[in-house]
């Protein structure tokens, strides 16, 4: 039995800007960070001791005064099409997604597809499936909410796409738990639920994103896996918003001393030199930038 089995936990519910502004695409709200800032503030000001995040929502650079104390074992990293299979969609079928990463990769695979935006919780998103089309959601969300059995029982087609087809977002399927940097007691508690392999993978993925600028507006993704022999393998992606250009590359560390963050940075450098910098340079800039 855990030494902390009798620990009392109180839930502090915090509504974020991303929860409130459902009429605006996430990337227009500022992308990463819109679902976490208010939660982090609750920890920093002492209203809470821990912040639990979907790791893909965290900005790539740690917030001042906070650290990731635990990354539990990762869930399903894949994306899922609900309402049909990619190979069976009719020409010009409509895909509903709020993610530029998903949109770019699907446009690369199927240039004929039509795309519309999508916001809201998972139930809301599923209710907005276009006629004859699909919605795209994280498979981990369907599994954690136990929605997958019901969808399959209703004979709704669900196409779960492998990372080789649709590379995930940085941190997808992972949970990150933050605590205050100076809170040794909380860090000690979090050590009991940390999965070192998942934590290593997340470190590499976040370093990849940080090198690209953290709040990069381009479609980007990365997925790292720790192999049984200790090697870390990470694949990264940069794409144009319209999906006409998709760059992918894989790097891996040797077994032995680990330099996970450096590996993610090296991957980003490779993609930037392979054409990614030109994609970044081509992004529209706000006046004065």
Image: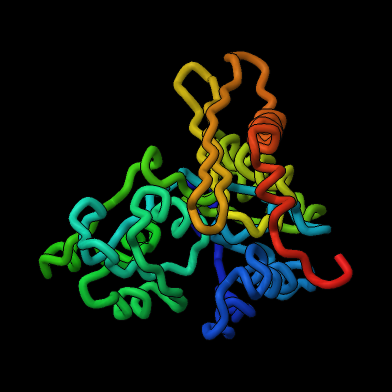
Of residues 199 and 190, the one drawn nearer to the viewer in this rendering: 199
Q: Is residue 195 left or right of residue 186?
A: left
**Residue 62 makes an appearance in the image:** yes
Residue drawn 72% across the image and 64% down it: 284
How is the protein colored in the picture? rainbow
Query: In this rendering, would 193 be left or right of 212?
Result: left
Residue depicted at 49% across the width and 63% down the height: 99
Q: Position of residue 88 (x, y in %)?
A: 18, 55
Q: Residue furthest right?
A: 288
State whether residue 9 is above or below residue 120: above
Q: Quadrant of residue 228?
A: top left
Residue ID at (45%, 57%): 102
Q: Quadrant of residue 277?
A: top right
Q: Quadrant of the C terminus?
A: bottom right
- Quadrant location of residue 271? top right
Q: Position of residue 133 (x, y in %)?
A: 26, 69
In the image, 249 versus 171, the foreground residue is 249
The relative height of residue 23 versus residue 47 in the rendered view (above or below) is below
Q: Residue at x 53, y 46 (%)?
A: 245
Marker count (numbered)? 0
Whether residue 193 is visible: no
Residue 202: image location, x then y, percent: 59, 42
Q: Is residue 67 above or below residue 149?
A: above
């Amino acid at each position: 039995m855990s030494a902390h089995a009798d620990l009392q936990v109180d839930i502090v519910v915090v509504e974020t800007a991303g929860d409130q502004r459902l009429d605006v695409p996430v990337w227009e709200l500022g992308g990463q960070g819109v679902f976490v800032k208010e939660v982090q503030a609750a920890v920093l000001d002492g209203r809470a001791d821990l912040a639990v995040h979907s790791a893909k929502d965290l900005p790539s650079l740690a917030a001042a005064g906070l650290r990731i104390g635990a990354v539990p074992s990762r869930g399903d990293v894949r994306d899922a099409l609900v309402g049909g299979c990619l190979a069976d969609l009719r020409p010009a079928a409509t895909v509903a997604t709020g993610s530029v990463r998903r949109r770019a990769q699907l446009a690369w695979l199927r240039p004929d597809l039509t795309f519309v935006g999508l916001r809201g919780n998972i139930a809301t998103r599923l209710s907005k499936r276009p006629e004859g089309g699909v919605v795209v959601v994280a498979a981990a969300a369907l599994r954690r909410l136990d929605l997958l059995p019901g969808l399959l029982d209703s004979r709704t087609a669900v196409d779960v796409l492998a990372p080789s087809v649709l590379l995930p977002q940085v941190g997808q399927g992972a949970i990150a738990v933050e605590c205050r940097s100076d809170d040794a007691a909380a860090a000690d508690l979090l050590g009991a639920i940390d999965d070192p392999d998942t934590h290593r993978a997340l470190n590499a993925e976040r370093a990849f994103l940080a090198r690209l600028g953290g709040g990069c507006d381009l479609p980007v993704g990365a997925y790292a896996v720790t192999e049984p022999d200790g090697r870390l393998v990470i694949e990264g992606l940069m794409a144009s918003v319209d999906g006409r250009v998709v760059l992918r590359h894989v790097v891996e560390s040797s077994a032995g001393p680990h330099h996970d963050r450096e590996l993610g940075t090296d991957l980003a450098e490779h993609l930037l030199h392979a054409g990614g910098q030109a994609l970044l340079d081509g992004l529209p800039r706000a006046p004065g930038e």
